[in-house]
């Protein structure tokens, strides 16, 4: 009784390892690289716009190259960051899962297995007392089954 609520409470309390996952050392470099790729796209786009308006002399090579570098570089940086973060994220997830499993096992032991073992022990004591009173042995089929259930 109350096991689902206790498990929910344990999941909230012990769900994640303490603290947030540490931010990797390469994170600021990746953010700077992504910002640079965005800036390349904006500069290339403004340069092309300036050519269309007539403010900048016509030259498609450099602005298009800047835009292509930003358009291709951004996803490449994102992909490499995803690969670099995958290992630490997996370790963090395994640790969180281990903590949840330990908490659930402890809760199950305390709320299900221990009371069940105590009840089986009381049942066995009652059967032994009954056997003494009636003179019957404990080696009968039901007695042997009850004896092995507590082990």
Image: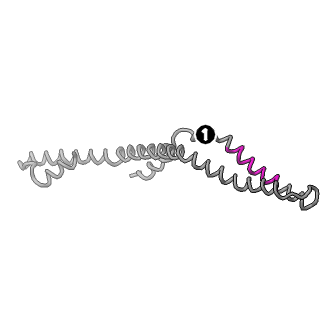
Q: Is residue 25 above or below residue 115?
A: above
Residue nearest the observer in this picture, 7 or 69: 69
Q: Left or right: 58 with respect to 103?
A: right
* Residue 47 image point, x, y percent: 86, 55
Could you say which quadrant of the image residue 44 lies in? bottom right
Residue nearest the observer in this picture, 3 or 16: 16
Residue sitting farthest toward the right: 55
The C terminus lies in quadrant: top left
Could you say which quadrant of the image residue 65 lies in? bottom right
Task: Give the residues drawn in magenta, as a range.
Answer: 30-44
Q: In this view, does 104 lie above or below 49?
A: above
Residue nearest the observer in this picture, 56 or 101: 56
Residue at x-position 31% and y-position 47%:
113
Residue at x-position 23% and y-position 48%:
120
Residue sitting farthest toward the left: 135
Q: Is residue 67 above or below residue 19?
A: below
Residue at x-position 78% and y-position 50%:
39
Q: What element carries label 1?
A: loop
* Residue 88 image point, x, y percent: 53, 43
Residue at x-position 71% and y-position 48%:
34
* Residue 1 image point, x, y percent: 38, 52
* Residue 30 image point, x, y percent: 67, 44
Residue nearest the observer in this picture, 16 or 40: 40
Q: Left or right: 76 with respect to 96?
A: right
Number of numbered discs on residues: 1
Pointer 1: what residue?
24
């Amino acid at each position: 009784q109350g096991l689902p609520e206790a498990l929910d409470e344990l999941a909230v309390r012990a769900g994640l390892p303490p603290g947030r996952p540490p931010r990797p050392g390469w994170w600021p470099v990746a953010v700077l690289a992504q910002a640079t790729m965005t800036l390349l796209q904006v500069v290339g786009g403004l340069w092309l716009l300036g050519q269309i308006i007539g403010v900048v002399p016509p030259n498609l090579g450099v602005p298009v190259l800047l835009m292509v570098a930003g358009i291709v570089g951004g996803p490449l940086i994102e992909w490499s960051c995803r690969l670099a973060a995958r290992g630490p994220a997996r370790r963090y997830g395994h640790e969180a899962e281990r903590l949840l499993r330990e908490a659930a096992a402890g809760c199950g032991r305390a709320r299900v297995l221990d009371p069940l073992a105590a009840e089986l022990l009381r049942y066995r004591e009652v059967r032994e007392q009954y056997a003494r009173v009636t003179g019957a042995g404990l080696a009968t089929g039901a007695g042997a089954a009850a004896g092995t259930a507590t082990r």
